[in-house]
Image (cartoon, rainbow, N blue to C red):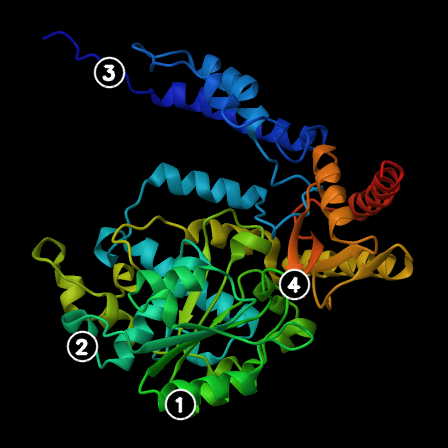
Amino acid sequence: MPEEKSFHLTPEEFRRQGRAVIDWIADYYEKIESFPVLSQVEPGQIRASLPHEPPPHGEAFEAVLKDVDNLIMPGITHWQSPNFFAFFPANTSGPSILGELLSAGLGVQGMLWATSPACTELETHVLDWVADMLGLPAKFKSDGAGGGVIQDSASSAALCAVLAARERATLFESNRRGCDGRLIAYCSAQTHSSVEKAVKVAGLGRENLRLIETDESLAMRADALAQQIRKDKEAGLIPCFVCATIGTTSSNAIDPIPDIGVLCNKEGLWLHVDSAMSGTAAICPEYRHINQGLELADSYCFNPHKWMFTNFDCDCFYVADRKTLIQTLSILPEYLRNKATESGAVIDYRDWHVPLGRRFRSLKLWFVIRHYGVEGLRHHIRRHIELAQNFAGWVRADEQFELCAPAPLNLVCFRHIAGDEFNQKLEERLNRSGKLYLTHTLLKNHYVLRFCIGQTHTEERHVRQAWQHIRQTAEEVRGSR
């Protein structure tokens, strides 16, 4: 019989082309500072450069990689640039990239313990490691009633927390009866928008999300929360969920977790604590004070894919009572039944989040922790915070600029004293220059610039150059008025 034709890569072809990709990535990091940080293309420009029809026949890999350079790279905003100071970091590292590559090569579908025991057991073990690294309460570890799971993002963690709170508040009747419009959730006006989306997806409704006032430091006021809960209960409503934040997106404000936790425990509300970026700081013992009050929380999450050198997506979500989460999300059709699951001796992480399918995410986190070690991670986190504090000091000492919020960790919120319109023009000109990228927010009705330090390869020279460029550009904007 004639040999059957195959279009697949042979192992030898894969080796050759794989080496080419590794070389490409290594070359990219060597020259990453030569690219404009923010992509300079116009809307539709990338699509216009692509062929209208897919290729009828396979093309040489070299041609594909060449088009990455010519067609794709102009449309890349370089999140891994050491001059990226926008949003929050989404950093990665060599060991994380290699762990991701290995995960892709294995192609594991880790929905059940039985579908790859190592995928489940490594995840459980690594998340217990991380709980110890952060000094989290023991109740969040797997040897008790709680445990951790890797979600894709803090948004998914928030949704799971809202769903669990909904079910607990209704004694697991809501799936049968539906939400009746009486369940109420709470967060501050500074809380990430993912909580608003979560309450909408969970069926509570946006109108049942209460935005609680903040204090001068932009942290949630526990007394205002207590007052709103009391008002809602008097109206016959059912308070069920509170999201507190350690490090809000706009200003890095830290909500008073101990006071909020005492209130939630007293009222029987599910307390979820979102520490998406700032949680990483707790690896360093001197910053572990940010976790005060977590012993009162029902769930907690932070993102290694923000500031722990682990590429997206990787959110560590912990619960104090895994039974409630599993009871909320578990559905077991016949085609998923197996002896290991029925024995009750294993974890099936499909019951810990919304999707059934799941990738082998813990592999890259394991690679990162083993490469850097706890002390290596602490070294870089401390350095980033030190650089941010230096930047805040330069702002404080300059008569033309002012700080707009406390800077407890690695985010500095500042503005030029010339006003909102000036700061908007300053931001636009800075980002158009390609030399750096930063973003803005509104704090106390003022247009404020955000400068966040957390990229893997950011050093002191990058921060100094950025400050010099900001001051110089401000002078140019003043001269053009």
Q: Amino acid at mark 4?
A: Ser
Considering only order in the chain, which callout, 1 or 4, is on the residue closer to the N terminus?
Answer: 4
Considering only order in the chain, which callout, 1 or 2, is on the residue closer to the N terminus?
Answer: 2
Q: Amino acid at mark 2?
A: Glu
Q: Secondary structure at mark 2?
A: loop
Question: Residue 267 got which mark?
Answer: 1
Q: Amino acid at mark 3?
A: Ser
Q: Position of residue 117 (x, y in %)?
A: 28, 56
Q: CA distance from mark 3 to mark 4?
A: 55 Å
- The answer, for residue 322, to whether it is visible in the render is no
Q: Amino acid at mark 1?
A: Glu
Q: CA distance from mark 4 to mark 2?
A: 39 Å
Quadrant occupied by the C terminus: top right
- Between 108 and 415, the one nearer to me in the picture: 415
Quadrant occupied by the N terminus: top left
Q: Position of residue 165 (x, y in %)?
A: 33, 75
* 194 versus 221 height, above or below: above
Instruction: State the residue position of label 2.
Output: 173
Instruction: State the residue position of label 3.
Output: 6
C-beta proximity under 8 Å, tags 2 and 1 = no
Question: Residue 428 got which mark?
Answer: none
* Disc nearest the viewer among 3 and 2: 2
Instruction: State the residue position of label 4.
Output: 251
Q: Secondary structure at mark 3?
A: loop
Q: Secondary structure at mark 1?
A: helix
Q: Quadrant of residue 17?
A: top left
* Disc nearest the viewer among 3 and 1: 1
* 240 versus 23 height, above or below: below
Q: Residue at x 68, y 47 (%)?
A: 85
